[in-house]
Amino acid sequence: MVFIFYVYILKCSDNTLYTGYTNDIERRVAVHNQGKASKYTRGRLPVEVVYYEECNTKSDALKREIEIKKLTKAEKLRLIHLS
């Protein structure tokens, strides 16, 4: 079985951004919106996907997640609007 991994950015109800990775983006967002995926997003529901990238390996997704998390909010917003 071949998996595609995703790095994603969520927009929270308080207009903050959350970055994560998964191999099933629809399921992961649903779990976020159930308040079960992240302590950070639990208090900022609902969340919506505003950006995602596909990665071939879990390692690539984790590396990209770290890169995105290091960006400022303004840089993340530029990334979102360029997609």
Image (spheres, grey):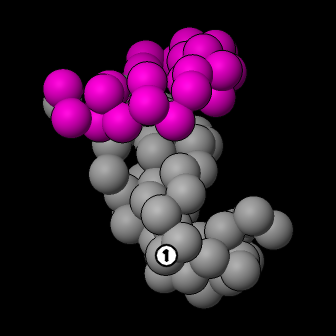
- Which amino acid lies under the numbered mark 1 shown in the image of this protein? Ser
Q: Residue sitting at 60 percent across and 43 percent down?
A: 20
Tell me the chief SS of the magenta region.
Answer: helix
Residue furthest to the right: 39
Q: Position of residue 44 (x, y in %)?
A: 62, 76
Which residue corresponds to mark 1? 13
Q: Nearer the viewer, residue 58 or 50?
A: 50
Q: Name the residue furthest bottom.
A: 34
**Is residue 61 in view from this perspective?**
no
Check residue 45 for magenta coloring.
Answer: no
Disc 1, SS: loop
The quarter of the rendered structure image containing the C terminus is top left
At x 36%, y 57%, the residue is: 49
9 on left or right of 71? left
The picture places residue 35, in percent across and down from the top left corner, at: 68, 82
Closer to the camera, 38 or 55?
Answer: 38
State the image quarter where residue 38 is shown: bottom right
Compared with residue 10, is residue 33 higher up or lower down, i.e. above or below?
below
Above or below — where is 20 with respect to 48?
above
